[in-house]
Amino acid sequence: MTARPIIIDCDPGQDDAINLLLAFSSPEALKILGITTVAGNVPLNLTERNARLMCDIAGRHDAPVFAGCDRPLERELLTAEKIHGKTGIDGVDLVAPRQPLEAQHAVAFIVETLRAAEVNSITLVPTGPLTNIAAAIETDRTILDKVQEIVLMGGAMREGGNQSPSAEFNILVDPQAADIVFRCGRPITAIGLDVTHQVLGTPQRRDRIRAIDNDVARATVGMLDFFDRYDTAKYGSLGAPLHDPCTVAYLLAPELFKGKHCNVSVEIHSELTMGHTAVDFWHVTDRPRNALWMHSIDADGFFELLVNRLDRFSHA
Ligand code: RIB
Ligand code: CA
């Protein structure tokens, strides 16, 4: 099996960071062409630094890291330090990363890489606001033919919103960008809160990761311990949802997920419901079924996968 070429676009954020570590754990399955970063959970100068630090922790310096857009296409930047801490990855020891930052802008990297690629050959894995992806599409729409699939974390249907009563954070930060992406015509697999709220980092699950004796697992559980405190207080749940690692988990083990092809449209006019993802789950309209909307996950299977792949770093 040849490794699937992917570009991960992210705003680390503890869950984005764990997603990067999960991707690094599986080089036989995933070829990370580049890691592009965007402003979201914390400002861009921190998201790019945090992504580079994950390369150091994983001991992987073969994936170049790029800084992208430092604000949404049209709106003011919303950040989420209340959830992720001032650094964006509170829970892990912060040192200056060794992994360099590329000089090229992330959007230019995405455009250039796709222009040079074969048709239907590259998977985009955005786990933050979709600003970089939308900017790349707007720069040169011909790159869309090269996109095999977009596997994104974002949106919500049954779960309501986590950043407003009706919008999930990634979509609300840049609804215009999300609208461009959902209308782009390429295969989209959308993993929203309906799935990620089923994947909770409970104390028992975190203890299984704590028992793994390597730096990657230690960083993961340190970030989960910090990440846990906000959502458990907010939802009264037994652990914080592992939002972004569901994207790489889907690439590694799609059988863990269940979804349905639906129309997903983004609210970009009403301030009351700005960034809402209107999912036509029961096909009550004739809108194009532009996304595979994920609605279920085998959460125990997800954590088996995560523990198994983190353990690989003990034998690296
Ligand atoms: O709503 C959850 C999403 O917003 C995750 O991607 C998290 O990292 C934040 O970006
Ligand atoms: Ca994220």
Image (spheres, helix red, strand yellow):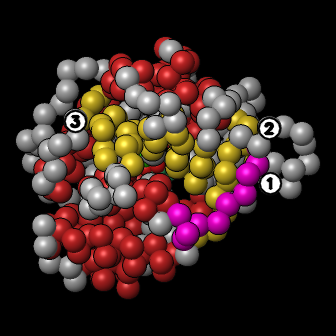
Q: Position of residue 121 (x, y in %)?
A: 46, 37
Q: Which mark is residue 193?
A: none
Q: Position of residue 143 (x, y in %)?
A: 50, 22
Foreground disc of the pair 2, 1: 2
Task: Check whether the beta carbons of the residues at disc 1 and disc 3 lie within 8 A of each other.
Answer: no
Q: From the image, tell me which residue sits under label 2.
A: 288
Q: Which residues are magenta?
A: 254-263
Q: Which mark is residue 64?
A: 3
Q: Which mark is residue 281?
A: 1
Residue, far front: 1
Q: Position of residue 289 (x, y in %)?
A: 77, 43
Question: Above or below — where is 286 with respect to 204?
Answer: above
Residue under the image location 55 percent in, 18 percent down: 141
Q: Residues within 10 Å of mark 3 (few under 14, many from 20)?
A: some
Foreground disc of the pair 1, 3: 3
Question: Above or below — where is 165 with respect to 197?
Answer: above
Measured in 3D between alpha carbons, the distance from the residue under mark 1 to the one under mark 3, in whole angstroms, is 38 Å
**Residue 257 lies in the magenta stretch:** yes
Amino acid, disc 2: Pro
Residue under the image location 54 percent in, 26 percent down: 144
